[in-house]
Image (cartoon, grey):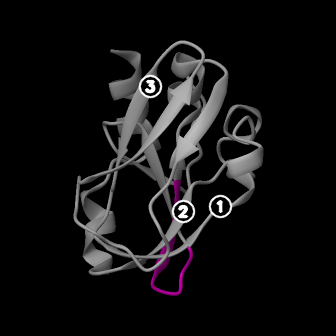
């Protein structure tokens, strides 16, 4: 069973979303995803200011085993990317819900959060 956090929302493509309470969200990949990828060696993130469409492919995470696309779990504008991942992509392996966050996005519509999975729903997806 992969670890999840009850305060996060999730996608079936293994991204997590934290509501920052100010119209922005922080986004990363789940513990399950980082375990499946193995040692992460490179992350291609979108640019701050970029507008994302829901479920749009927005970047690539490369590990020693594979390269995997990641998708926008919400639509909105990228307001910040985790620049420390440029030099330390392994932070995603070490702390997928902490220092390994990928980006922050200003939501186009806060209602999008309700369409995402809760922790229990994601655990069922990850178990498949």
User: What's the CA distance linking mark 2 and mark 3?
Assistant: 19 Å
Q: Give the mark toward the camera: 2 or 3.
A: 3
Q: Mark 1 points at which residue?
A: 82
Q: Quadrant of the N terminus?
A: top right
Q: Do the residues labelled 2 and 3 touch (CB within 8 Å)?
A: no
Of callouts 2 and 3, the N-terminal one: 3
Locate residue 41, reporting x and y percent. 65, 29
Locate residue 91, reporting x and y percent. 75, 41
Could you tell me which residue is drawn at 64 percent across and 28 percent down? 40
Q: Name the residue under label 2.
A: 103
- Which label was assigned to residue 101? none
Query: What span is colored magenta in the figure?
Result: 20-27
Whether residue 120 is visible, yes or no, is yes
Q: Mark 3 points at which residue?
A: 67
Locate residue 26, reporting x and y percent. 54, 65
- Please check the rendered image and state whether residue 21 is part of the magenta-colored stretch, yes or no: yes
- Please check the rendered image and state whether residue 67 is part of the magenta-colored stretch, yes or no: no
Could you tell me which residue is drawn at 50 percent across and 28 percent down? 33
Most foreground residue, 61 or 120: 61
Most foreground residue, 3 or 59: 59
Whether residue 1 is visible, yes or no, is no
């Amino acid at each position: 069973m992969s670890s999840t956090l009850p305060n996060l929302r999730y996608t079936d493509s293994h991204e997590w979303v934290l509501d920052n309470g100010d119209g922005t969200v922080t986004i990363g990949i789940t513990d399950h995803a980082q375990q499946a990828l193995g040692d992460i060696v490179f992350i291609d993130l979108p640019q701050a200011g970029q507008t994302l469409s829901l479920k749009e492919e927005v970047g690539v995470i490369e590990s020693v085993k594979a390269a995997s696309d990641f998708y926008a779990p919400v639509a909105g504008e990228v307001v910040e990317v985790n620049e420390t991942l440029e030099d330390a992509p392994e932070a995603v392996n070490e702390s997928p819900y902490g220092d390994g966050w990928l980006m922050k996005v200003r939501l186009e519509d806060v209602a999008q959060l309700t369409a995402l999975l809760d922790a229990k729903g994601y655990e069922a997806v990850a178990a498949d």
